[in-house]
Amino acid sequence: MILWINGAFGSGKTTTAYELHRRLKPLSYVYDPENVGYFLRKNEPIWLQQPNFQDEPLWRKFNFEMLSYLAECFDGVIIVPMTVINPTYYQEIIGRLRKKGIRVDHYVLGASQTTLLKRLRRRLESKHSWAAQQIPLCLKALQNPIFEHCLEPDQLQTEDIIQLIGNQSGLEIQPDTDAP
């Protein structure tokens, strides 16, 4: 099974992914599609590079192939924290995985613009950073019904979110042994 955690930058995807991983160990693995983008940046001539590496067909193809391979070889939950707001790209990766018979449960962390900007400031990003500039586009795009299972991190703590994901995906989330 693949759990895809989607949302705007600052919505809590990575925090949620690693907390899920910690509570599902050893039966989970976090896969970061951004690493493919970094690889492409380092290995392509600059004139081939797109401003957003998701716009490169090779990024989508490689992530589909890698996730397909992992799903076939790894007997556990693959957790993918990645913003994907283009419905075509969603279909090229998640849709193709599903057509291949791989279970992909997709969740959107639908934080408000105020929450997102606050979280980005905590990461020392200004309201003029690339991530902050993407917020309006992300919020609008993620309203498309193709992006199913929207959770509201403005009203929920990470613990609540992982419990909801666990319940909706039929996963047994281990107790938080690090809690006070």
Image: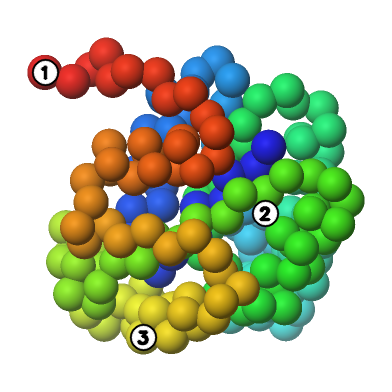
Q: Residue at x 62, y 36 (%)?
A: 78
Badge 1 amino acid = Pro
Quadrant occupied by the N terminus:
top right
Q: Residue at x 25, y 77 (%)?
A: 113
Q: Which residue is mark 2?
A: 36
Up/down of 158 relative to 6, above or below: above
Q: Which is in the foreground here, disc 3 or disc 1?
A: 1
Query: Which comes before the other along the chain, label 2 or label 3?
Result: 2
Residue 62 or residue 17, whichever sits in front = 17
Residue 171 or residue 19, whichever sits in front = 171
Are there few (<14), some (14-19), or many (20+) residues within 10 Å of tag 1? few
- The disc label shown at residue 100, or none: none
Q: Which residue is mark 3?
A: 136
Instruction: Answer yes or no: is residue 52 visible.
Output: no
What distance separates the C-alpha of mark 3 from that of mark 1?
Answer: 37 Å
Badge 2 amino acid = Val
Query: Which comes before the other along the chain, label 3 or label 1?
Result: 3
| Residue 147, horizontal then vertical, whole percent | 56, 69
What distance separates the C-alpha of mark 2 from that of mark 1?
Answer: 37 Å
Location of residue 61 by image quarter: bottom right
Tell me whether the residue at label 3 lies in contact with that at label 1, contact meaning CB atoms closer than 8 angstroms.
no
Q: Which is in the foreground here, disc 2 or disc 1?
A: 1
Q: Which is in the foreground here, disc 2 or disc 3?
A: 3
Query: What is the number of callouts on the image?
Result: 3
Q: Which residue is mark 1?
A: 180
